[in-house]
Image (cartoon, grey):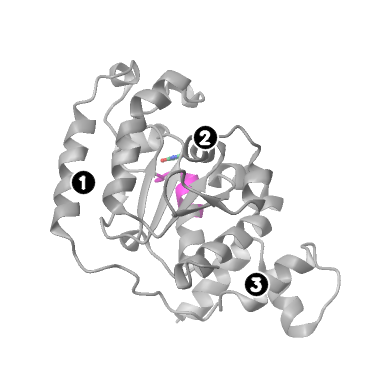
Amino acid sequence: MMTMADRQRQILADMGIDVWLLRDNTGAAGASVSAEVSKSAASGISTTATAKELERPADSDAVTALTLLQNEVKNCRLCDLSKSRTQTVFGTGTAQAELLLIGEAPGAEEDRQGKPFVGKAGKLLDAMLFAIGFDRSQVFICNVLKCRPPNNRDPKPEEVEACAPFLTAQIDTVKPKVILALGRFAAHRLLKTEAPVYKMREARNVLPGTDIPVVVTYHPASLLRNPEQKAQAWQDLCRVHQLLESPLI
Ligand code: URA
């Protein structure tokens, strides 16, 4: 039977980051990722780590606030996406999450199911979360837009603006210790910048007006298209993990 450690190792391998694990153990040369990645992995998260209990005590006010907000989103007609959507995609997870993940917008599958990240990119996101010891019930996942843009086109600025109060309310309610911005749309919205993802990844960002760290990483759909970015995404996940352990890092 596959143990938890075996499964985590398998997931790491699927993410393309088995290379530095081998190198750390054997000193094998020729790894395709940088020494820096190797170092952060070695000093970062053990693949045998078990899922952590990071949820805060239940806060019924936050649960109620999210439920009310979800209802508002459901009835929202602030932009034209309300005409083409099958349903709104509010977000899922716990109101007590220490980690809030923010993506771009629902795709076709999310529009059908009413949940964020349930397609192929979502499967990869689950694996990424699992690699740092979380499952979906321990975090909160949502998007900048709560409705699907037709044909998966990019969100329009006016749609992002119309949806912004919902995202702000979600952040204010969940009060996460760390935000992980998945891709450029989430990062641009949160950090009020137009910088490219690679620059935002390297910066020590905080959500403007707060001391909440915002870690920027590649969108899982981008990782599926560009698997060579996975090693960098792993670095970003290690940073999230470090920040949750010790917010002052
Ligand atoms: N991509 C996103 O940004 N969000 C989803 O929910 C699904 C795919």
Q: Secondary structure at mark 2?
A: loop
Instruction: State if disc 2 and disc 1 touch (CB < 8 Å).
Output: no
Residue 143: image x %, image y %? Answer: 40, 39
Looking at the rendering, which quadrant does residue 73 occupy?
top left
Res. 196 mark: none
Tell me the magenta residue range.
117-124
Of the pair 225 and 138, the residue shown nearer to us: 138
Residue at mark 1 to residue at mark 3: CA–CA distance? 36 Å
Residue 213: image x %, image y %? Answer: 49, 55
**Amino acid type assigned to the residue bearing label 2 in the image:** Lys
- Quadrant holding ligand 1? top left
Residue at mark 3 to residue at mark 2: CA–CA distance? 30 Å
Residue at mark 1 to residue at mark 2: CA–CA distance? 24 Å
Q: Measuring 62% from the left and 67% from the top, which residue is drawn there?
A: 13
The residue indicated by pointer 3 is 41
Of the pair 206 and 50, the residue shown nearer to us: 206
Q: Quadrant of the N terminus?
A: bottom left
Which mark sits nearer the N-terminus, 1 or 2?
1
Q: Ligand 1: does it lie within 8 Å of the C-beta at label 3?
A: no
Which mark sits nearer the N-terminus, 1 or 3?
3
